[in-house]
């Protein structure tokens, strides 16, 4: 019998050129002499024989090659409906395996999902795109879906198909740009990537933008994960959070870089795991009297020295410290000990790494094509195209994902100023005005407003904190009053003025008292957090203790005065790790804090002083209840 398909169609499959391999592969009705039959086709590289097997009856039907030695088909006479079949595949090395046909299964993403995603309004798109273990037609497997609208062909590759792009080619769903495929017989723990072929035939191996877990760097594969395994025990915390106004509560934040807070030097200077940190870090923070831990970015990133601020796996806690379930345990343990968890979130830019978001489908998909809008000159990174619905949907869903799946209590949005100004860190001629001739990035502004509206509608009682370094009005005001919708903003002006003041010799300070009083002129224009953050103890700025003038005794005295003034000043509080023990050296992400300093009395006393500051602050309502109104403070 002649093949039921043309050589050109087979060639399109063999060369990964077809946008919908389901049109050719899998089961298809076939009329023969006026009778309904079924033809089943398969492309099985590295095979010599393929049989179609009926698991219920045990019948086997040999498949014959058609136009290519690895392209097979068989005509099944008679059945009204095609049965659930398997392939018995004899490999070139003689090994046999039995597999279900991925081209048998219907799409698992509905029209409504695609419509909402295209509108930028699918708040749980992470439940559809990415890799999801599931059962379809009583068959266990993993459903893969990825957005790559300009690709010519997309395949999912991994250990399960020896990283061969021809074995699991995906189909595009209409004009949505979403490619999907259900792969039977695999499950949690599989390592995978997407092989993306652009319109010019170039091939890119990409990590999953919606991947829940990644290999430990320098490897870059995504890992199929199940986020439902952890049994949460923090419902009481979540209920209390939802009915509490956080701005009327004491907020004393301990800012932490998980990779350098503490290490295990006797084991090759390894990181602590999420589960080890849950007990070591949380118990320490609770004993010190802090109310919240703020984590420098924990989303997956390839470069340690970026401190987490160059994110590639937006939906995955970094595997440096363990699994997604381990991070859920960490947050759960925090809540059971009455400690809130805030995470740094980085929507302003992303790195250029070849396996990441940049040039994802052979075009500028997530970033602006014009470098005057798509290139971040300070960090040599890419800038998201906030005006594109699917891109803003990616970022909004990502934020909601961390609240929903990891129960975090707030985000701190990094580098807001670089998002809202088109001319940020650019010279004349290096930026494009908006449609009104201004320098405001209207797309980014609308994005931030919408993001904050959704955060507070879904998760009342949480925090959305802006790191915004300019005088943009209303950053921490509701959107219905014209604000950006955050409920807190870092007070960078107070930090700069006060550190400048305290670093001066006391004999000169009487000429600069305005530097510590000026902040009260604008203290109630925003809901401020007073911060002494990681940015102030790196890049030659010296540690806080070392910034202080005088001999050693005077340095400690000055630092105590600085901290006491800070805790009496209106605004919530944030201290970077190491401040409380009097680090002499600048912070370095590759090393642990200098915990041995606590062997010396001045450092132990400083630590006790910070602990007492937290105790007084938390137990005296006058220090926190009316932080954002002038009636709550007088000299």
Image: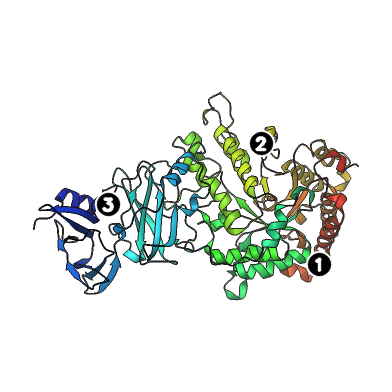
Label 3: how many residues lie within 10 Å, few (<14), some (14-19) or many (20+)? many
Cα distance, mark 2 to mark 1? 45 Å
Q: Looking at the rendered structure, which numbered label has been put on residue 21?
A: 3
Residue 540 shows up from this direction: yes
Q: Residues within 10 Å of mark 2 (few under 14, many from 20)?
A: some
- Tell which circle, 2 or 1, labels the residue nearer the N-terminal end: 2
> Which residue bears the numbered disc 1?
604
Instruction: Give the x, y percent position of residue 533.
Output: 70, 51
Location of residue 271 by image quarter: bottom right
At horizontal 58% and vertical 26% (from top left) the residue drawn is: 438
Q: Which quarter shows the C terminus?
A: top right
Is 387 left or right of 503, judged from the image as shown? left
Q: Judging from the image, what secondary structure is the residue with disc 1 in?
A: helix
The N terminus lies in which quarter of the figure? bottom left
Q: CA distance from mark 3 to mark 2?
A: 47 Å
**Rendered residue at 44%/66% (across/down):** 188
Which of the two labelled residues, at mark 3 and mark 2, occupies the earlier sequence position? 3
Q: Which residue is mark 2?
A: 479
Q: Is residue 554 visible to us here? A: no
């Amino acid at each position: 019998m002649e093949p039921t398909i043309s050589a050109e169609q087979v060639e399109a499959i063999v060369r990964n050129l077809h946008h919908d391999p389901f049109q050719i592969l899998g089961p298809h009705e076939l009329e023969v002499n006026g009778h309904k039959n079924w033809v089943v086709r398969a492309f099985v590289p590295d095979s010599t024989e393929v049989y179609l097997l009926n698991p219920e009856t045990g019948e086997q039907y040999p498949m014959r090659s058609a136009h290519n030695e690895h392209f097979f088909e068989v005509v099944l006479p008679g059945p009204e409906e095609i049965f659930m079949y398997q392939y018995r595949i004899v490999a070139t090395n003689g090994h046999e395996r039995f597999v279900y046909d991925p081209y048998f299964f219907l799409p698992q993403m509905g029209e409504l999902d695609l419509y909402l995603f295209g509108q930028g309004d699918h708040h749980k798109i992470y439940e559809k795109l990415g890799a999801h273990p599931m059962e379809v037609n009583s068959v266990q497997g993993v459903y893969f879906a990825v957005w790559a609208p300009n690709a010519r062909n997309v395949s999912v590759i991994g250990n399960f198909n020896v990283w061969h792009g021809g074995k699991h080619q995906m189909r595009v769903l209409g004009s949505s740009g979403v490619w999907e495929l259900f792969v039977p017989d695999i499950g949690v723990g599989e390592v995978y990537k997407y092989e993306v072929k652009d319109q010019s035939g170039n091939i890119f191996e990409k990590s999953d933008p919606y991947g829940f877990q990644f290999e430990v760097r320098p490897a870059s594969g995504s890992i199929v994960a199940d986020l439902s395994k952890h049994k949460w025990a923090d419902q009481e915390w979540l209920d209390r959070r939802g009915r509490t106004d956080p701005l009327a509560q004491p907020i004393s934040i301990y800012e932490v870089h998980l990779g350098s807070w503490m290490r295990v030097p006797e084991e090759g200077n390894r990181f602590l795991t999420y589960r080890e940190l849950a007990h070591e870090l949380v118990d320490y923070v609770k004993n010190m009297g802090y109310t919240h831990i703020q984590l420098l970015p924990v989303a997956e990133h390839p470069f340690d020295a970026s401190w987490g601020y160059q994110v590639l796996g937006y939906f995955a806690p970094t595997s440096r410290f363990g699994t997604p379930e381990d991070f859920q345990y960490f947050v759960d343990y925090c809540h059971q000990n009455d400690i809130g968890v805030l995470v740094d979130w980085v929507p302003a830019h992303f790195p250029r790494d070849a396996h990441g978001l940049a040039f994802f489908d052979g075009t500028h998909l997530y970033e602006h094509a014009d470098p005057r809008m798509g290139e971040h000159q300070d960090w040599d990174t890419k800038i998201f195209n906030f005006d594109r619905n699917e891109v803003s949907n990616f970022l909004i869903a990502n934020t909601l994902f961390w609240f929903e799946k990891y129960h975090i209590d707030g985000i701190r949005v990094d580098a807001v100023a670089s998002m809202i100004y088109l001319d940020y860190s650019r010279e004349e001629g290096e930026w494009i005005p908006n449609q009104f001739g201004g320098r405001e990035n209207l797309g980014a502004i609308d994005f931030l407003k919408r993001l904050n509206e959704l955060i507070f509608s879904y998760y009342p009682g949480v925090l959305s904190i802006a790191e915004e370094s300019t005088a943009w009005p209303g950053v921490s005001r509701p959107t219905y009053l014209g604000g950006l919708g955050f409920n807190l903003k870092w007070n960078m002006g107070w930090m700069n003025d006060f550190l400048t003041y305290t670093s001066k010799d006391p004999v000169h300070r009487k000429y600069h008292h305005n530097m510590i009083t000026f902040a009260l002129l604008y203290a109630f224009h925003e809901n401020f957090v007073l911060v002494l953050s990681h940015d102030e103890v790196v890049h030659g700025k010296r540690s806080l203790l070392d910034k202080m003038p005088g001999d050693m005794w005077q340095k400690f005295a000055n630092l105590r005065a600085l901290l006491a003034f800070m805790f009496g000043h209106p605004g919530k509080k944030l201290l970077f790790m190491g401040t409380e023990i009097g680090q002499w050296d600048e912070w370095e992400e590759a090393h642990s804090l200098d915990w041995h300093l606590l062997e010396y009395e001045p450092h132990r006393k400083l630590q006790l002083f910070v602990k007492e500051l937290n105790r007084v602050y938390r137990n005296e309502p006058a220090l926190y209840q009316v932080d954002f109104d002038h009636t709550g403070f007088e000299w």
